[in-house]
Image (tube, rainbow, N blue to C red):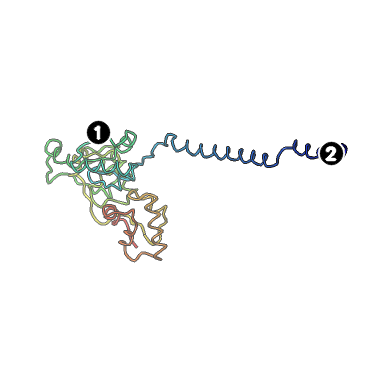
Amino acid sequence: MLALAFVFIPRILMSLRPDPSIELKAEEVRELRNESARQLKKFDNRFKKKQPRKYSLPITRFDPNTYTKADWMKLGLSSKQADVVLSFAKRRIRSNEELSRIFVIPEELFELIKDSTYYPEKVSAVMSSNVPMKTSKSITININVADQIELEKIPGVGPFYAKNILKYRERLGGFVKKEQLLEVWKMDVEKYNAIEMFVEVQGNQVRKITLNTATAEELKSHPYLNWNIANSIVKIRVKKGKFTTIDDIRESVLIDEELFEKIKPYLSL
């Protein structure tokens, strides 16, 4: 009996010890549970409410009918939303009221851009009723050299518009054409039509940016350029060594024909 005890007792004791393989499987189960929780969290995040789309201010005043798809997308619209706006523009958008009724333009974006839009088609509609006939004795002010006192001599221009014109002239580096007054803050078509006969742009008096030495920060300071465009110009210059012609900046995919023509007078080598 004693011999049998020596044989069977160790076996009985071994059977009562926890199976190492079972402990290992329990660890694996816990790890699987943790991994499942991580995956579930990722899955839930996909269905959480998306962050509101960020919208941007336009860099200058603009006619919504001439904006390209890329321009609208820079403001924050999606590709499909931009296509819808372009379809309305083909039929002409004649006012901010019509612009606000385009269902794909969120109210948040409209509030950002409404003071930066203008509609040249209004020009002919207001010329006959709101603008006096120009006579040979009419005062004419060169807006590239006039100070605030001189600007206030223009009929319809008070201190508010005079200061805004001067501020924008400084940012711009000077006016190339008087139509750029439409880019001045709060200058609408009606106001422009009332004063345009009294203003002129004479001489080549614009301040130029030297492309081969300007930093991205200096380029960005011009109202026609933002940080992304300025940075792309600097990167192209670094790649090329230097610019040989102003046309070289057109290698940037961010510079379309319209922007190039607007910024070209303000650039030099």
Give the quadrant of residue 248. bottom left
Viewer-closest of 252 and 78: 78
Taking the spot 21% from the left edge, 46% from the top edge, the residue there is: 199
How many neighbours does mark 1 have within 10 angstroms: few (below 14), some (14-19), or many (20 or more)? few
Q: Earlier in the sequence, mark 2 or mark 1?
A: 2
Horizontal relation, residue 254 to residue 200: left or right: right
The C terminus lies in quadrant: bottom left
Disc 2 from disc 1: Cα separation: 97 Å
Looking at the image, residue 212 lies above or below residue 113: below
Where is residue 142? Give x, y as percent.
24, 49
Viewer-closest of 170 and 255: 255
Horizontal relation, residue 130 to residue 35: left or right: left
Q: Please tell me whether mark 2 or mark 1 is closer to you in this view.
A: 2
Specify the amino acid type for callout 2. Answer: Leu
**Number of marks:** 2
What residue does disc 1 label?
Answer: 101
Viewer-closest of 95 and 27: 27
- Residue at the front extreme? 1
Could you tell me which secondary element the residue under label 2 belongs to? helix
Where is residue 120? Give x, y as percent.
19, 42
Specify the amino acid type for callout 1. Answer: Arg
Where is residue 108? Give x, y as percent.
34, 34
What residue does disc 2 label?
Answer: 4
